[in-house]
Image (tube, coloured by chain):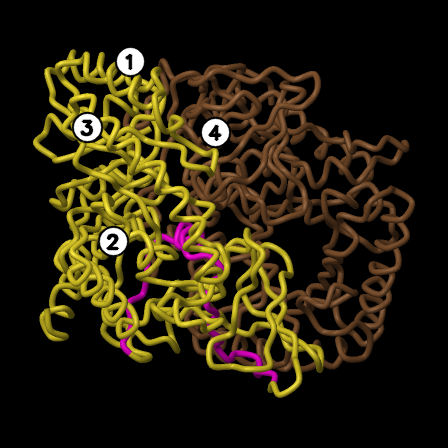
Chain colours: A brown, B yellow
Amino acid sequence: MDRRSFLATTMTSGVIAATSGAATSVAAAEMDVSGLTKANIPTPALVVDLNAFEANIQKMADHCRQAKIGYRPHAKTHKCPQIAKRQVAAGAFGVCVATVPEAEAMAAVGISGILLTSPIVDAGKIGRMVALASGGGKVMLSIGHPREAELLAAAAGAAKTQLDVLVDLDVGDKRTGILPGESAVELARQISRSKNLTIKGVQAYAGHASHTIGFEARQRVSREAIAKAVETKGLLQRAGFDAQILSCGSTGTYNIDSTIEGVTELQVGSYVFMDVDYRRIGSRDGNAVYSDFQPSLTVLTTVVSATHSERVTVDAGTKALDTTTANIPQAKNRPGLLYAKNGDEFGAVNLEPGGKLPAIGERLEFIVPHCDPNVNLYDRIYACLGDKVEAIWSVAARRENAAGKI
Amino acid sequence: MDRRSFLATTMTSGVIAATSGAATSVAAAEMDVSGLTKANIPTPALVVDLNAFEANIQKMADHCRQAKIGYRPHAKTHKCPQIAKRQVAAGAFGVCVATVPEAEAMAAVGISGILLTSPIVDAGKIGRMVALASGGGKVMLSIGHPREAELLAAAAGAAKTQLDVLVDLDVGDKRTGILPGESAVELARQISRSKNLTIKGVQAYAGHASHTIGFEARQRVSREAIAKAVETKGLLQRAGFDAQILSCGSTGTYNIDSTIEGVTELQVGSYVFMDVDYRRIGSRDGNAVYSDFQPSLTVLTTVVSATHSERVTVDAGTKALDTTTANIPQAKNRPGLLYAKNGDEFGAVNLEPGGKLPAIGERLEFIVPHCDPNVNLYDRIYACLGDKVEAIWSVAARRENAAGKI
């Protein structure tokens, strides 16, 4: 897709979803972006640099094509149908999602091949996923506990709906999934006793590998974790299951996991935006900065107080700049300025050697420490070329927004 | 207001605001709460215990009445018009707000006496505040820098609108405001050169005092900070300004600042909800737990993975439980269970001595570490009596929601 058609796609979809209903089609005119620039949109604002963003989309597409591996990018990162559509257009199988509202928001814009990677164990959420499948949406669930299998089988049976299922494996991060090996095979047998559920393979998210610093160390951790999934996939096949899929990987391990025999698709997420946490894990060629993908996501802020000679205050605190990880926001193109938390509404920007303190009213952009929870703080993303706003994208699947469901 | 009329108020307002428009009046039927309980609402969910919440509202009202001091509670804590209305009904002057969308959301439900405590320095936001005042809303702004004064004077003059103003003082937390003393008097002189702006007093938020642990230490820090504001208010009066208001205080210093001669109103916020951060600052009578107000706000979660013998996984990670401060979420009524961060989507719950690990599908509630940013993660609050949902309140002023403004 060339620049012109890409922009045409994104610009016609510069819409905001209403809170209620699955509508993502509020008239574009309501969110007219003409005249909007980084100088006049209200701050704090979530901004995407379209050049960096497009390059990231393309680079992952190229990598997977060359590596002959599939990918189903994780939409938990962006919760944004416009971005998901762009990923699918570039060659992704579909998208992974972490929540039912995300699944609903993606299905609402016609995205097929939606894999829910999180366990769900309550009747309401299970019913909503079955309803998506019954409505003709192509959805797949991952199951990591006998109780999940029991509930899903009952709901799918009652609705006379067929669902594809992956066995979710805990390959070391102790978060979700069943232990690999015989436990997983036993769970698969239970699942397959339901006529409505079909085993398609395994999922193995190695959260402990994705942010391991240093390529060699990261490769070691990821290979060790994924080996368990490869082995379990083999066990399932030998037990007679048509287990073709092994879904795993992250932005940190995309070029590791895609070389492992048996892996069929990647669940990469952060690559579209990048963040400070990922920038520091180091690249394959030994660079301390992980520069495989470009930081495209920033929070635009305004200097609102300038009383002191060594610091100013910007209008982005913990409600606007995620600070749940160990890293701090990095001022973009402004060396010598150091962000520090200063409450829920404000951030301090301290002067360091070589820096120049901005004046009141000046705008500063910060690369976010961790992209996923930072996007979750906003309802919209300003997609920019240079300083010009080209489109406004809706973070339509943010928490309770999607489909207005209670 | 008795229980019956209180519930009548809250239940008729169990509505969700649409994303676009200032409408907070989507038909209540759309959010029918009949049959909803803590056992069946989708998790993670933000829940308020109405008994504890009401007691907190009442206790602050009683305290201020007995101390003969005013209060203008800070709506940045809840961003919720239904809660603001309840605070005003209990005797508050109005509400403080931290953002322009908050001001708009509060004005939209008829709340008067809105004080914007944050500095704003861009034409769009200033224009929106002037528009609120022009529309008959009673709003007041706080100004801490000559540039703010210049921009506001120009906008108010162009709109031929009168605005009341407090001089925002930096009394020690180096966040916003001008330095107390002669700098503040000079700023007041500049402000008063505009026919459209009227000095009403000073604002002095001592963020460094609010969470000081131990009552005596907290009192020392707060008295030292507020003394500067009292002195500056005196300077303004002697310079001829009708500076009657001194607005300051927090949930941590409400019973300190209300005893300081010259303070006229409190900006208390967190008292309606409480949180782990405030629970640990200690009370006046020497208790380690600050029990002046009751924890009313929790995040309801579901155990979604139970693969290991020493821990389970709940469906609330950094996107659902604010972890931007040093404290961790506390399991409510479940001793021996310790929450630990486990990514954006999930939390680990580890077994401690004396605890009993919950089963998959069980629901656990957690008292939040810090209430303000935690509310900011949600669009709605489930107001409950026991396990029953009595109303759903809209977090209508969450970031870009209010008025659908770009």
Which residue is label 3 attached to?
A: B237
Q: CA distance from mark 1 to mark 2?
A: 38 Å
Q: Which residues are magenta?
A: B357-385
Asked if the residue under mark 4 is in contact with the one under mark 2, i.e. CB atoms within 8 Å, the reply is no
Quadrant for residue A37, please give it: top left
Q: Is residue B163 magenta?
A: no
Earlier along the polypeptide chain: callout 3 or callout 2? 2
Same chain under badges 3 and 2? The reply is yes
Same chain under badges 1 and 4? The reply is no
In the rendered image, the quadrant that contains the N terminus of chain A is top right
Q: Which mark is residue A314?
A: 4
Camera-side residue of B202 and B111: B202
Q: Which mark is residue B16?
A: 2
**Helix, strand or loop at mark 1:** helix
Of marks 1 and 3, the one in the foreground? 3
Quadrant for residue A53, please give it: top right
Q: Residues within 10 Å of mark 3 (few under 14, many from 20)?
A: some
Which residue is label 1 attached to?
A: B150
Residue at image location 44% in from the left, 52% down from the top: B220
Residue at image location 33% in from the left, 49% down from the top: B249
The kind of residue tagged 1 is Glu
Earlier along the polypeptide chain: callout 1 or callout 2? 2
Q: Is residue B126 above or below residue B387?
A: above
Q: Residues within 10 Å of mark 1 (few under 14, many from 20)?
A: some
